[in-house]
Every structure is written in structure tokens, then in C-alpha cells.
Image (cartoon, rainbow, N blue to C red):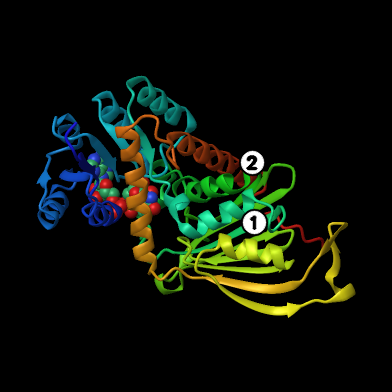
């Protein structure tokens, strides 16, 4: 392999183009060529980024001057393309989800491992510094144990016309698989192994489009997580709210790529200092201070001591796009380090690709079962 890792892109749609814009600034990546089933789109992107155009995915994969193939095509194509690329001895960066089902994902993982190749899934959430703060809070003791976490994802559908592949479960896998995997991966990273306990979905009236899904998952012996994804908003109304309840306070974040974190906490002074050290660059506001008997409180039938009610806020000085781009670059650099040194420990591996998919597949199966077993039967008793 040459000094830089030589990169080829399959799929020049919205996300492939965004990734090219990010990866071109990476010193250890040499962007070589692109392809798309739409040759006019591939030509345009090749021209815009001063790259070569391959006539097809097969042609790109066969090129000896490419080390890594990035698949930014719809989910239903991932298995076949990744299988072909790995078989040809290429490392693969696959967009999420890895595949549409767990069996195919396992197949790809086995192939990559047998051939000693890196198979990466672009599950970027772990590279967000705010998500990393939550990870250290969930792993540590300063806020006590995590009790409940919820994600409410009110997503835009303004750029998703009815004919878009996103709405076709045969091509996308459905919302849990196409999009939910990001969040299943993150919750498991925060809270440890879990399982989906219930799920449901809603059809847009008068259509066969599922535009709302929800599910609950349980992690360990006490943490409950809930996920709501609704794709029904105007672009300008797209918003996501996170609420993570710990024994000693609540973390709130906003944005599907969170760019704002707030910790509303009740702590001793020593715990507050510890928390401040874990949230780099945060602003601290003391809401209340307690003296004497008022310091003694209890919750969950446990006594504790509280000196302060404080609100910490953290807003990295970057836009969502800048942070998103940084997360993408960090994930690819992490995977390249694993190409160079097989002992390198990656933050995201192919195992996370299959595990996040397993949650999504389970949630989709439960939602399908619920829809067929209970076709909109109201509980109302006259
Ligand atoms: N990691 C992330 O944060 C993130 C964000 C957005 C999208 N994605 C993923 O990226 C992928 C693409 O999403 P998008 O929004 O760019 O879709 P898109 O429809 O805009 O682009 C997909 C492109 O792939 C091309 N294509 C389809 N089949 C092909 C084939 N067999 N060979 C060559 N080209 C083919 C299409 O012509 C299209 O140009 C999806 O898997 C999506 O889930 C990931």
C-alpha cells in the first residue's frame, strides 16, 4: 500500500458528496475515483472534486490503485457491493446500516476477518465529544446510575418524496434499520448490552408509508431507553431532543448530531468539581446552595448529601455541519489506523455494525407483529 490510503467512492448522492468534501482534507487519504449508476452524476462529482470516474462499481472495485471502497449507496445494495469489494481484497467503509439483515452482516464480517481486511460501518455518533461526555458519565459514578434515556427525533421529510428509496423497506430496511442504528449503537455504548422490549409503528393515513416508529429497550438491570423517530417535519422544523436521567441529575442534549448539552444536577461540591472536569469548556450556574439539614435528601430509598443545585451548559464553538464533518473524518482516520496497524483499537468496529443492526431488526419485527396483530383497534370502552 502507498503512503496514503487510496479511496474510491460508490454512490455520488447527497451523502457521498458530503463525505468527499470532508475526506479531501485528510492527509492520509488520497481520493482517487468515484462511480454511480447515474453516470452523469458520477461525472459531475468527479469533475467537482477533480477525480477519475469509473464506469461501474465492478470497475472501481477491480482497480489495483484503490485500497478502500466507500459504499454510500442505499442500504439494500450494501451486502452485494461490500461482498464484491472484500472478495477483491479491498478494505470497506460501508454506510449504515451494514446490511438489511443480521445473517448477511455476519457473512461480511467473516469474509473481512478471513481476509484480514478492515470492514468499517459509518456509525459516527461515538466521535461526537458531547456523546463522549455522556459515555464517561454513564461509565462513572459522579451522577450515580443511569435510570432512563429518551430520544425524540422529529425529522424532516421535505427532501424525501414518496418515491424515495427511504420509504421502501425492501431498499432501506425501514426507519429503525436505515436510521435507528445510529442511536441503538450509541445507547449500547453508553449503557452496555440491552434488548428491545417493545416496538410499534404508524402508517401515514391513506398511504403505505411508515413515517413513525417507536421502541423501548432495557439495558442491564435498571436502565430503560425509549426511541421515537417520526419523519414528518418541514426542513426548518427538524429537531431532536435527548433526555438522560441519572440518579443525581438530568442531561439534556439537542440535535441528532448533538451540539448542545446541559446537565441539571444536585451534587456535593466535590462531585460538582468532578463533573466540571468531565465536561470540557462548560459554563456553570449555581441555582441553589443547601446548608445544615437541607443537605440531607433521599431518592430511590437511598440517603444522600447535596450541597448545590447547578446547571452546566456545554456548546462546542462549531456548527452542526462542522461537527458532523469532524466526526466523519475522525471515524475514517480511526479505521485507517487499523489498516496500518491491526492492533489499533477502533472506537467503532464491524461488531458495532452487526449489533446495532440486531436491535433494529428486532424492533422492526416487533413493530410489524404489533401492526398485524392489532390493526388500529382502540382501547376505548363505550
Ligand atoms: N453515516 C451517516 O451519518 C449517514 C448520513 C446520511 C446517509 N447515510 C447513508 O448513506 C447512504 C446513501 O444515502 P444518500 O442520502 O446519499 O442517498 P442518495 O440517494 O442521495 O445517494 C445514493 C446514490 O447511490 C447511487 N447508487 C444506487 N445503487 C448503486 C449501485 N449499485 N452502484 C452505484 N451507485 C449506486 C444512486 O444513484 C445515488 O446517487 C445510505 O446508506 C444512508 O443510510 C449515512
**Residue 125 appears in the figure:** yes
| Residue 194, numbered label | 2
On-image quarter of the N terminus? top left
| Picture quadrant of residue 65 | top left
Q: Is residue 95 left or right of residue 297?
A: left
What residue is shown at x 12% (from left), y 39% (from top)?
55
Front in this rendered view, residue 357 or 146: 146
Task: Please give the residue where the numbered disc 1 appears in the rendered image.
Answer: 149
What residue is shown at x 9% (from left), y 54% (from top)?
47
- How crowded pointer 1 is (Cα within 10 Å; few <14, some 14-19, many 20+) is rated as many
What residue is shown at x 48% (from left), y 38% (from top)?
352
Q: Is residue 4 left or right of residue 303?
A: left
What residue is shown at x 62% (from left), y 62% (from top)?
275
- How crowded pointer 2 is (Cα within 10 Å; few <14, some 14-19, many 20+) is rated as some
Q: Is residue 264 above or below residue 108?
A: below
SS under mark 1: strand
On-image quarter of the C terminus? bottom right
Q: Is residue 211 left or right of residue 270?
A: left
- Farthest residue to the top: give it: 114
| Residue 10, numbered label | none
Residue 168: image location, x then y, percent: 41, 47
Q: Is residue 127 left or right of residue 147?
A: left
| Picture quadrant of residue 278 | bottom right
Q: Along the polypeptide, which appears first: circle 1 or circle 2?
A: 1
Residue 137: image location, x then y, percent: 62, 55
**Residue 206 appears in the figure:** no
Instruction: Quote the CA–CA distance across marks 1 and 2.
Output: 13 Å
Front in this rendered view, residue 123 or 208: 123
SS under mark 2: strand
Amino acid at each position: 500500500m502507498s503512503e496514503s490510503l487510496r479511496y474510491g467512492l460508490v454512490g455520488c448522492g447527497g451523502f457521498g458528496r458530503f463525505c468527499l468534501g470532508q475526506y479531501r482534507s485528510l492527509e492520509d487519504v488520497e481520493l482517487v475515483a468515484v462511480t454511480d449508476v447515474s453516470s452523469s452524476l458520477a461525472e459531475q462529482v468527479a469533475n467537482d472534486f477533480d477525480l477519475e470516474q469509473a464506469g461501474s462499481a465492478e470497475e472501481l472495485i477491480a482497480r489495483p490503485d484503490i485500497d478502500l471502497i466507500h459504499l454510500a449507496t442505499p442500504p439494500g445494495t450494501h451486502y452485494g457491493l461490500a461482498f464484491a469489494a472484500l472478495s477483491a481484497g479491498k478494505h470497506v467503509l460501508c454506510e449504515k446500516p451494514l446490511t438489511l439483515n443480521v445473517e448477511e452482516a455476519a457473512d461480511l464480517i467473516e469474509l473481512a476477518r478471513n481476509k484480514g481486511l478492515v470492514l468499517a460501518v459509518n456509525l459516527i455518533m461515538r466521535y461526537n465529544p458531547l456523546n463522549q461526555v455522556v459515555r464517561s458519565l454513564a461509565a462513572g459514578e459522579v451522577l450515580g446510575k443511569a435510570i432512563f434515556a429518551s430520544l425524540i427525533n422529529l425529522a424532516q421529510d421535505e427532501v424525501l418524496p414518496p418515491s424515495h428509496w427511504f420509504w421502501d423497506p425492501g431498499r432501506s430496511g425501514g426507519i429503525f434499520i436505515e436510521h435507528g442504528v445510529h442511536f441503538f449503537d450509541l445507547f449500547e455504548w453508553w449503557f452496555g448490552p440491552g434488548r428491545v422490549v417493545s416496538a410499534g409503528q404508524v402508517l401515514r393515513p391513506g398511504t403505505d408509508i411508515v413515517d413513525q416508529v417507536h421502541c423501548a429497550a432495557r439495558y442491564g438491570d435498571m436502565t430503560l431507553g425509549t426511541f421515537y423517530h417520526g419523519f414528518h417535519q418541514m426542513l426548518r422544523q427538524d429537531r431532536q431532543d435527548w433526555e438522560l436521567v441519572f440518579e443525581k441529575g438530568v442531561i439534556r442534549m439537542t440535535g441528532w448530531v448533538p451540539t448542545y448539552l446541559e446537565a441539571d444536577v444536585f451534587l456535593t461540591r466535590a462531585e460538582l468539581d468532578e463533573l466540571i472536569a468531565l465536561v470540557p469548556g462548560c459554563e456553570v450556574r449555581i441555582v441553589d446552595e443547601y446548608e445544615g439539614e437541607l443537605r440531607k435528601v433521599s431518592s430511590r430509598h437511598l440517603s444522600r448529601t447535596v450541597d448545590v443545585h447547578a446547571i452546566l451548559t456545554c456548546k462546542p464553538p462549531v456548527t452542526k455541519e462542522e461537527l458532523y464533518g469532524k466526526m466523519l473524518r475522525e471515524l475514517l482516520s480511526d479505521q485507517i489506523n487499523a489498516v496500518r496497524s491491526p492492533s489499533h483499537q477502533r472506537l467503532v468496529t464491524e461488531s458495532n455494525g452487526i449489533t446495532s443492526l440486531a436491535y433494529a431488526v428486532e424492533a422492526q419485527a416487533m413493530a410489524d407483529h404489533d401492526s398485524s396483530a392489532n390493526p388500529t383497534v382502540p382501547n376505548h370502552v363505550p
